[in-house]
Amino acid sequence: QVQLVESGGGLVQAGDSLRISCGTTGRTFSDHVVGWFRQASGPEREFVAAVNWNVPRTNYADFVKGRFRIFTDVAKNTVGLVLNSLKPEDTAVYYCAAVPQRSYYYIPDKTDEYDYWGQGTQVTVSS
């Protein structure tokens, strides 16, 4: 099965930028949708962004408002998330998830739609 590994998290100041990445072991992202979710203090994981690897079509949460950008790196077989203009409320563990694509328009924003999950990477934004 596909294994996901997140990296790139860290401690930054408000207004800074950060790039986190999601990679795989054992197989590629081909024919998969890859999403980013985040979990702060609560029990729920919040949808951030997702991309259909092959198209690539994207889907963003409303709160992103142009601050974040999801992208695919074919050469490295990774999916990155660029976090710009970071705010303290962006502090969370960011998780990567994947699911086989069913169509070009299938880019889900619900946790139960994804089959594979990474362990997460911590992003902390100070005031």
Image (cartoon, helix red, strand yellow):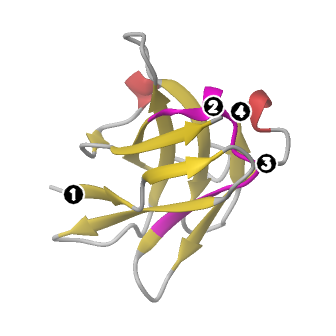
Answer with mark 2 or mark 1, whichever residue precedes in sequence. 1
**Drawn side of residue 45 relative to residue 91, left or right:** left
Q: What is the distance, in whole Å, between disc 2 and disc 3 at their CAs?
A: 14 Å
- SS for callout 4: loop
Question: SS at mark 1?
Answer: loop
Give the residue at the far bottom of this rendering: 75
Q: Which mark is residue 53?
A: none
SS of the residue under disc 2: helix
**Mark 4: which amino acid?**
Ala
Q: CA distance from mark 1 to mark 4?
A: 25 Å
What amino acid does circle 2 point to? Pro
State the mark number for residue 67: 3
Q: Given this view, does label 3 or label 4 mark the residue nearer the observer? A: 3
Residue 2 coordinates in the image, percent (x, y): 21, 57
The residue tagged 2 is 88
Spatial CA span between label 1 and label 3: 29 Å
Q: Which residue is mark 4?
A: 61
Considering depth in this image, is 100 or 67 the residue closer to the camera?
A: 67
Please name the residue that numbered disc 1 is placed on. Answer: 2
Residue type at numbered disc 3: Arg
Between the C-alphas of marks 2 and 1, the distance is 32 Å
Say left or right for 42 vs 3: right
Q: Residue at x 49, y 82 (%)?
A: 74
Q: Earlier in the sequence, mark 1 or mark 3?
A: 1
Q: Report x, y in % for residue 19.
A: 55, 63
Residue at mark 2 to residue at mark 4: CA–CA distance = 18 Å
Secondary structure category for the residue under label 3: loop
Give the answer, above or below, for where 66 lies relative to 7. above
96 sits left or right of 58 in the view: left
Q: Is residue 62 magenta?
A: no
